[in-house]
């Protein structure tokens, strides 16, 4: 079987999950740290209506930049997120089927479910599940949500977050993600190397601390103002912006150990406010 | 009789949950089967992360018979003069579901009463199991549980299915929505044999197989035979059919400090680091699950992932060592120690002073003292490095590595690492004087600060480790044989907090307690741990007796405990104990009276003069023996001097005389004799009543 390109992996996952009743929604256009922040997961985890969706989410982790020098770490990468609410008993089998569908030989390689009590302190979200390892490489985060925004959920959603680059590395047998083939002979590095170097420099050395500290305040203020008006989605978009501003400050080394929990609590408080508003005003 | 088997199939539990869950499963079966009067043979449990199995051998097929007598009204009420049952008797019989004819009369201590004998139905095993097994499964507790469907069931991870076999019969067990797994097997044994063919069922056998594989590989590679026990235990539950895979990684990563390498491998990739003559080598062992894997390819993947991780560690290492290590120390101002106790920079400032104070008390050389002070300044700096941010367990170790890299003195670097010791109950202790003094300073600072701000352990809940700190403190002082005055040390630690509070205007927390109260509390915690740390073979009363005396010198406490337990059955020891007991008893009556020095002019009786003579003639010698720590000898002399004299004295002289000046003088004499021994050796009056033949 021909080895899939990065682009084909996404296509195949879309096909696979679409066939299993998922809506294929598009990425969120705001900077976020993970697919969980997308409203299609954050808001849709609540309530008793079934929900199934899948999407690619470009994710930013300013602290993880390595100036394109590490074969496994990036400050910008792609998650493939699946959310199934409520979860179904055979979900893990379906997940393993998806790996087979991508051409991963799970008989020759070892798939291991390693405990991971997942938590997103900024979203007040937590769940129990695993990191899925393929020969000791973490390729997926698999979580049964228990809480979002500190609110106990009515139905337990299952969140499956594939690390697209990681899986591709496996499929293409290349242990540097910059060498992955995106498609038609174009490498991942051709598209992303320069960005990685420049953003690493930006996040670690150039981002203006004063401006970011102020932006955090403005975003927080704006989120609250919009929440006061009952504009949930716009308010939430400013929560995400505040969260990203905090991440940049963190990467710049501008957040002391002391301040860190306070920043996180502020973002969590905003997220909770949006979630409660969403639940109150549900049409 | 038939064998019974329960198999809980579950989505992978955390490996660390499995062994405790199996223990609970077994105990719950023992308990519930007993309560249900179900006879059975051996109970065995097997498990992996994905399955918990319990086998009960030779279970009886029904409950043991049981009948119970239920007492009713007295006979005189239940039957009239014609011996006919009254409405009361009829009502009682009806309530108990039996017929009036079946009522029995029995003689009891209260007279004749009516009884019914109720046979308790003996239920079949299948019915009992369907009742109790769901409860047993629910009784397995986990550190964290979850829900996964709308049934409300909770478990460590979702339950996939449940299999229950009684002999060859499948029994349906209901837990939430989990389906029953049905199998066709001739017997429980036959079913287990089939499982055994696909993997190693028994966890202990699996563990020893893995250990054998690893040590065989180590032998073959000419490496040290060493297996990380924690990782071995975890691996035992992560894999069912272990297969070994040995690989290597690029030598250049050996530049990463050894502890970082080891943590990267064992904690983050669950692979075993390897050593040759105690030095880490660029090889590893992985235990994977199941035969038929492409181990050649897997080896490469494992190595690649490890190298990518190590590359990250090198990145942290380079970032952290860009500047001299001590340049990072002021960043501790941003790191909070405890919300009421200021930041970590303030803490190291106290440690600098406290360790100098101890150095002076122990007459450490000027150079040594400087080194300790430097180590105190640097000892928490690694907390603000990226490496410790990523690998918190490496605190101390990285402090040492980075200090050496920044050309700090070796003794300073070692002291930084050692000041975190001991880590566990039986962990290593600091070996160098510098490390030990710093470790003592850190612990006393923790204890005083936390207790002072009103934090105390509650039951087994001791989140800030006050007991652990007290225990470590004692272990270090004992190990190093430091003769240091504990109350002086506590006093100084409190003074340093107070000075800082005043200088910085840091408010005292509302929960703070007064200085005397605090000193008492600190001493109490340390005493409590002292008792705990003395050997179990010693009678606890003897420990209490020693601890009632002066405890400021911890090394001395251990010496006294050892000396006295060696002679506790000697006659002279018992005589000494008797003297302590008699003087202490008589003094109990003197509470509130002011006892001063003994006035010789007031000694009237010949017998009391004899006692006093014995005291004045021998007290200096006894004091000297105690000072020289010759406790056996001191005990012998004390007993010899006072036992007979006091015996006669108490026989003939009435201590509590009418004349208060006489009484007070006699009591003062008793007190002098009592304190001569009990103040600095042990208050043997605390021993159980002493009988001397």
Image: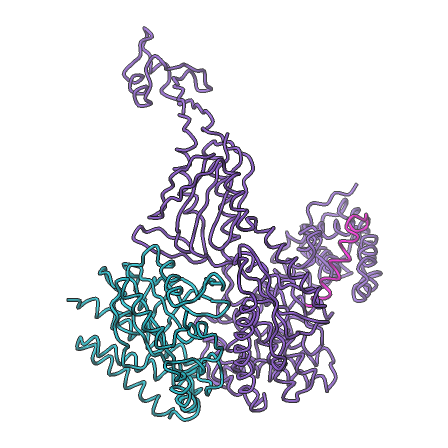
The x and y percentages for residue A155 are 28, 59
Q: Nearer the viewer, residue B532 or A165?
A: A165
Splitting the image into 4 quarters, where does residue B628 fall?
Answer: bottom right
Name the residue at 78% across, 57% down.
Answer: B563
Residue that lies at the very extreme toward the top in this rendered image: B82
Residue in the foreground of this view, choosing between B155 and B164: B164
Whether residue B556 appears in magenta in the rendering, the answer is yes
**Foreground residue, B71 or B412?**
B412
Residue A240 percent location from the top left of the image? 30, 79
Rendering colour (chain B): purple
Tag count: 0
Relative to A64, residue B52 above or below: above
User: Residue A85's spot in the image, x, y percent?
Assistant: 28, 61
Q: Is residue B28 above or below residue B304?
A: above
- Name the residue furthest left: A283
Could you tell whether A83 is left or right of B107 in the image? left
Look at chain A in the picture and name its colour. Answer: cyan
- Give residue B483's quadrant in the image: bottom right
Determine if the magenta segment contains residue B22: no
Which stretch appears magenta?
B552-573
- Residue placed at 17% from the left, 67% from the top? A282
Front residue of this view, candidates B538 and B376: B376
Furthest-front residue in this view = A1
Residue B43 on image: x %, y %: 54, 40
């Amino acid at each position: 079987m021909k080895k899939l390109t990065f682009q084909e992996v996404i296509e195949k996952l879309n096909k696979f999950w679409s066939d299993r009743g998922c809506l294929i929604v598009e990425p969120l256009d705001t900077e976020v740290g993970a697919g969980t922040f997308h409203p299609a997961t954050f808001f849709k985890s609540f309530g008793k209506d079934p929900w199934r969706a899948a999407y690619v989410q470009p994710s930013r982790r300013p602290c993880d930049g390595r100036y394109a020098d590490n074969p496994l770490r990036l400050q910008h990468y792609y998650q493939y997120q699946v959310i199934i609410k409520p979860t179904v008993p055979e979900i893990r089998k379906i997940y393993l089927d998806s790996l087979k569908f991508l051409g991963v030989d799970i008989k020759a390689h070892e798939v291991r479910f390693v405990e991971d009590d997942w938590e997103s302190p900024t979203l007040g979200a937590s769940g129990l599940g695993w990191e899925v390892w393929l020969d000791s490489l973490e390729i997926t985060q698999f979580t049964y949500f228990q809480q979002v925004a500190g609110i106990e959920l009515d139905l337990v959603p299952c969140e499956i977050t594939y690390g697209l680059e990681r899986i591709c590395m496996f499929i293409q047998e290349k242990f540097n993600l910059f060498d992955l083939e995106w498609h038609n002979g174009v490498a991942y590095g051709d598209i992303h190397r320069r960005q990685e170097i420049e953003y690493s420099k930006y996040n670690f050395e150039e981002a203006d601390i004063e401006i970011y500290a102020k932006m955090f305040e403005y975003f927080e203020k704006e989120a609250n103002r919009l929440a006061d008006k009952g504009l949930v989605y716009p308010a939430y978009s400013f929560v995400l912006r505040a969260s990203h501003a905090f991440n940049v400050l963190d990467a710049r080394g501008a957040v002391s150990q002391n301040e860190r929990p306070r920043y996180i609590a502020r973002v969590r408080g905003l997220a909770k406010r949006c979630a409660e508003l969403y639940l109150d005003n549900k049409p | 009789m038939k064998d019974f088997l329960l198999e809980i199939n579950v989505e992978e539990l955390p490996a660390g949950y499995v062994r405790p869950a199996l223990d609970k499963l077994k105990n719950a079966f023992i308990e519930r089967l007993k309560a249900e009067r179900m006879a059975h043979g051996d109970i065995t449990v097997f498990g992996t992360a994905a399955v918990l199995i319990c086998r009960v051998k030779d279970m009886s097929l029904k409950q043991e018979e049981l009948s119970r007598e239920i007492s009713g009204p007295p006979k005189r009420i239940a039957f009239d003069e014609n011996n006919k049952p009254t409405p009361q008797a009829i009502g009682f019989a009806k309530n108990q579901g039996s017929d009036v004819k079946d009522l029995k009369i029995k003689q009891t201590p209260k007279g004749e009463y009516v009884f019914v004998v109720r046979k308790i139905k003996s239920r079949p095993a299948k019915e009992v199991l369907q009742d109790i097994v769901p409860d047993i499964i629910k009784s397995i507790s986990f550190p964290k549980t979850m829900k996964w469907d709308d049934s409300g069931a909770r478990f460590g991870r979702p339950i996939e299915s449940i299999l229950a076999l009684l002999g060859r019969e499948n029994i349906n067990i209901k837990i939430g929505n989990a389906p029953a797994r049905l199998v066709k097997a001739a017997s429980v044994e036959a079913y287990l044999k089939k499982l055994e063919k696909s993997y190693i069922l028994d966890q202990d056998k699996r563990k020893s197989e893995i250990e054998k594989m690893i040590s065989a590989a180590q032998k073959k590679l000419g490496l040290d035979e060493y297996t990380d026990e924690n990782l071995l235990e975890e691996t035992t539950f992560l894999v069912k059919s272990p297969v070994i895979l040995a690989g290597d990684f690029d030598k250049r990563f050996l530049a990463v400090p050894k502890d970082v390498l080891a943590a990267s491998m064992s904690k983050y990739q669950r692979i075993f680091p390897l050593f040759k003559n105690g030095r880490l080598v660029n090889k590893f062992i992985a235990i994977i699950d199941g035969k038929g894997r492409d181990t050649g390819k897997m080896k490469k993947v494992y190595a690649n992932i490890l190298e990518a991780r190590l590359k990250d560690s090198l990145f942290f290492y380079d970032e952290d060592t860009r500047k001299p290590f001590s340049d990072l120390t002021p960043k501790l101002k941003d790191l909070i120690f405890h919300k009421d106790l200021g930041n970590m920079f303030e803490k190291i400032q106290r440690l600098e002073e406290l360790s100098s104070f101890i150095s002076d008390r122990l007459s450490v050389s000027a150079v040594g003292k400087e080194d300790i002070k430097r180590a105190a300044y640097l000892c928490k700096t690694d907390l603000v490095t990226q490496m410790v941010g990523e690998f918190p367990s490496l605190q101390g170790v990285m402090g040492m590595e980075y200090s050496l890299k920044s050309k700090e003195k070796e003794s300073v670097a070692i002291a930084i690492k050692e000041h975190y010791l001991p880590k566990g109950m039986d962990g290593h202790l600091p070996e160098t004087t510098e490390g030990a003094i710093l470790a003592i300073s850190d612990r006393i600072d923790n204890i005083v600060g936390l207790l002072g701000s009103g934090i105390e352990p509650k039951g087994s809940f001791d989140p800030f480790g006050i007991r652990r700190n007290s225990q470590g403190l004692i272990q270090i002082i004992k190990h190093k044989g430091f003769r240091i005055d504990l109350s002086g040390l506590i006093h100084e630690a409190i003074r340093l907090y107070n000075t800082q509070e005043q200088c910085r205007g840091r408010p005292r927390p509302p929960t703070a307690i007064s200085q005397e109260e605090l000193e008492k509390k600190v001493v109490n915690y340390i005493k409590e741990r002292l008792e705990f740390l003395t050997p179990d073979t010693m009678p606890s009363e003897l420990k209490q007796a020693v601890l009632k005396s002066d405890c400021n010198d911890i090394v001395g406490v251990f010496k006294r405990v050892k000396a006295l337990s060696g002679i506790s059955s000697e006659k002279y020891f018992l005589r000494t104990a008797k003297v302590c007991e008699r003087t202490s008893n008589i003094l109990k009556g003197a509470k509130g009276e002011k006892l001063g020095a003994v006035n010789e002019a007031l000694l009237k009786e010949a017998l009391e003069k004899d006692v006093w003579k014995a005291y004045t003639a021998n007290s200096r010698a006894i004091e000297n023996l105690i000072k020289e720590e010759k406790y056996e000898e001191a005990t012998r002399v004390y007993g010899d001097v006072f036992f007979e004299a006091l015996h006669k004295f108490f026989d003939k002289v009435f201590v509590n005389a009418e004349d208060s000046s006489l009484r007070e003088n006699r009591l003062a004499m008793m007190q002098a004799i009592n304190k001569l021994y009990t103040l600095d050796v042990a208050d043997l009056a605390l021993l159980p009543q002493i009988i001397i033949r």
